[in-house]
Amino acid sequence: MPTIDSLLAHPHNLPKIPEVMLELIQTLHEKDTDLLKISRQISKDPVISAKLLRLANSAKFGCSRQVASVNDATVRLGLAMVRNMVLACGLTESVHSVPGIDLKHFWGNVFNVAELASRLAQRVGIPPEQVFTCALLHDLGRLIMHVGLPENTVHHIHDLELHKGRAKAEELVVGFNYAQVGAVMTRLWKFPDTICNAVKYHYNPLAADTFSAEAGLIHLAIVLAAQSDVTEVAPPEWPQPVADKLALAWADCAAEFINLRNHGSGYAGLLAA
């Protein structure tokens, strides 16, 4: 029977993330971060630099003056958004193929969940950038398990998932779930505890000893992102106890779903290029 440690002990199972992403993760622990230092770190990676410039010059920021340097782009976007942009770029570049998973669809869904979670965070007065970071990482364990587990084990999990849900199916087959794998991975990358706990409990936020608002927001965003449309009444699967914990009304959540559907987040198309 595999364990999380044995799964993560093989380098070929793990996402191959760029050095600049690891360097920027460390700045999450710093009280005062030097934007110029951040710019120099990003400039080492031409792919991430180009995508950062594209975002800074996109319609999302509605500025007529085009920026041509990573330093100017960093100033325009701000530290929190730059961190998330680098994280998003690093994650999407870290895995090039996973059997049984359409990565374009996978990351598109992750970005939708992250955008919805951050918008809901704004509704309840929680810093949206950190929630966006947590949501970018929430499904990472799924990729690691698909790559690292034997094919027949993955198929067995998939068959059970239809009736039990993914996390429960994984626990029944291998004894742990994708969220736990993702949480251990984020600890290895030295993310703060707040982010690690959000990844660990996002699929069942009420199970945590101390409720994580970030986990709850991701949980709501996952259910919201899965809707084909919304009405004035919440769907039967809506996790009302989690919404109550966050003091979020269904009408506000539905409004954010409609806003995202109508205007998009600006991330998925940018990062796919």
Image (cartoon, grey):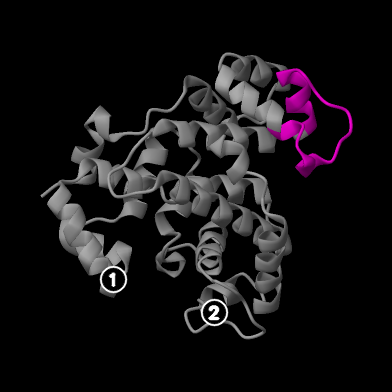
* Relative horizontal placement of residue 62, taking residue 98 as reference (left or right): right
Q: Position of residue 192 (x, y in %)?
A: 50, 40
Residue interval drawn in magenta: 55-76
Q: Residue furthest right?
A: 64
Could you tell which of marks 1 and 2 lies nearer the N-terminus?
Answer: 1
Q: Residue at x 79, y 31 (%)?
A: 76
Badge 2 local density, few (<14 within 10 Å), some, or many (20+)? some
| Circle on res. 144 | none
Residue 264 quadrant: bottom right
Q: Position of residue 56 (x, y in %)?
A: 74, 32
Residue 257 quadrant: bottom right
Residue 45 among those drawn in magenta:
no
Element class at badge 1: helix
Badge 1 local density, few (<14 within 10 Å), some, or many (20+)? few
Compared to 87, does 203 lie above or below? below
Q: Position of residue 177 (x, y in %)?
A: 29, 56
Amino acid, disc 1: Leu
- Per the image, the residue denoted by label 2 is 240
- Per the image, the residue denoted by label 1 is 162
* Relative horizontal placement of residue 3, taking residue 111 as reference (left or right): left
Residue 147 quadrant: top left
